[in-house]
Amino acid sequence: MSDRKTLQIKQISGHSGPSAGFGVQREPEVCKLVDTTICIGCKACEVACVEWNDMPFSPTTFDNTYQTMPETRWNFWNLIKFNEHQREDGTIQWLMRKDQCMHCADPGCLRACPADGAIVQYTNGIVDFQQENCIGCEFCVSGCPYDIPKFNPATKKVYKCTLCSDRVGQGLEPACIKACPTGCLKFGTKDDMKYVAEERAKQLRENFGFKDAGVYDPQSIGGTHVVYVLHDATDPERYSGLPSNPVIPWSYTVWKWLFKPVLGTFALFGLVGVLLHYVAVGPRRPQPEPLLKTPLPEKES
Amino acid sequence: MSTAIERFDHKARTAFDQIGQTEVYEGELLRHRAYTRFLHWMVALFFFLALFTGFGIYMPWLFRWFTPIFGGGPLSREMHPWFGLGFVVFFGLQTLNWLKPMKWTAADTRWMRNLAKIVGGKEKHDPPDTGFFNGGQKIQFWEIVGGCVVYLITGIILWMGARTFGRWAVAVSYVLHDISALIMLGGIFIHIYLSTIGEPGTFQAMIRGAVSEAWAWTFHPAWYKEVTGRDPLQACEEARRQDQAGRRGISGK
């Protein structure tokens, strides 16, 4: 839409290099801040996500925890993950972490995706799936360090959190932010959110006795557009498997942008080779070969 | 090779011989029986189905126009593993069928040394010890056997996905699967060329099952000798003399 000025495309899957129109307009990077230390696990964000994105009711699974279901689904993009962590002194701590797409600056899903334009990264940092171009190969699932893209067997396409790109494009905050009652979720520019997060971490360290409190914004994937404030940033794994050092398999980069076109061309050499052989050398015929031209019988007089 | 395979193969061959006819005319030799031909064309069918669905997954920006044939990108992706499975199964049966004639021998090593001469058209006849299959055919056959193993292992990993086998398994399988496909893609051009216009008279071996004696003594002399008991070069010379005599007969009228 023409009025979506804040959704300028930065890069799309299946293509190397910047896309048309990139860099024409300067745009601030957006960011969602999740302060795990004040999440009360009310699940308002889960409901808001399902409501705004108009997704059908998803059956929940009770597994004796405060978690709605074991993991996100193709139609359930926002899940409060729950972990009862036992400290060294025997006391326990309830860790609630809002699990959703992290909108990585260097998205593994986009790197892995072979389909033209099925995954789009906007200049503001949002990584969005365009289902009309998706072929359902699920390579994005292997590219994602957070296990976020989910396959829908009915449509044979993959879905995930859009960071409410439809709302953000209109100058609104994502639905989950709007629903959060405790102020655990905040939305703004990446710089602002990083500042607020660092301030909060400092407050936790100095006033609340969380010596290792910190901000989760992994630089191994260029940072994320969802940042967490954690009680203990030294061990993100305890927050239901938040990877401390998320990586994208290097084979995708090497293979897709280098060897795939090069070796594809080499395979075509087979075709070129046989054609050249036919022209230059000619076919091999069973021997003895017939003479090139049968002499015509002499005219009978 | 166990006897169970031999028994299975024998049973299949006899059964197919009752259905498919192989007519061998005067001056021809039986090359491939109905069972072999059936397997070959099933392999070919599934190979091309898998190839064209695979193109749509390999580089959609370039090969998107293949996908509507199969009902779009997602459906191509959905059917590709099944086509691939068909290819592997039928080629597996062909492997059992050809295990014996595809065994590598010293003659094949010699044939490979002569490759440049044969490809360059310097050598009209294949080396006299070239048997039922030559070295090049055997290399392509064993390449496909190896390729099928790679296809099967990496294909199942890609099929089940990262959530079953892990992210790295998929990321690596994806590369190996593609390399295997590209080698076969390069090979199929050579295979089709040599079996049609590259060596005229070859194609009927896989259609009717019979080849001319001239074809046999030219390209597979040792096999010709084994089947007919005649010396291939001598047979060729005889044919040449008869040919010339025939021509003289026409022109001398």
Image: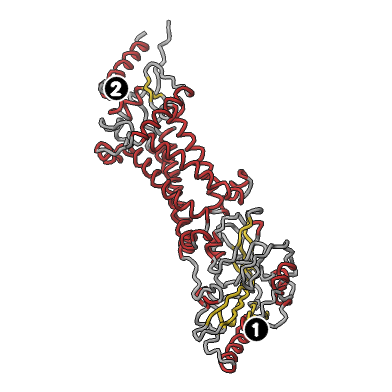
Q: Secondary structure at mark 2?
A: helix
> Residues at marks 2 and 1, common chain?
no
Report crowding for label 2: few under 14, some 14 to 19, many 20 or more residues within 10 A (C-alpha).
some
* Residue A132 placement: quadrant: bottom right
Residue furthest bottom as drawn: A207
Distance (Cα) linking label 2 and label 1: 93 Å
Task: Find residue A165 and report its horizontal and vertical position in percent.
Answer: 69, 69
Tag 2–tag 1 contact (CB < 8 Å) = no
Q: By what rule are the colours in the image chosen?
A: secondary structure
Report crowding for label 1: few under 14, some 14 to 19, many 20 or more residues within 10 A (C-alpha).
some
Name the residue at 59% across, 79% down: A95
Q: Which quadrant holds the N terminus of chain A? A: bottom right
The chain that hosts pointer 2 is B
Report the residue marked by disc 2.
Answer: B236
Residue B119 position (above or below residue A293) = below
The residue type indicated by label 2 comes to: Cys
Q: In this orientation, does residue B201 appear?
A: no
* Residue A204 placement: quadrant: bottom right
Q: Which mark is residue A38?
A: 1
Task: Find residue B54 and report its horizontal and vertical position in percent.
Answer: 53, 48
Left/right of residue A96 with respect to residue B204 in the rendered view: right
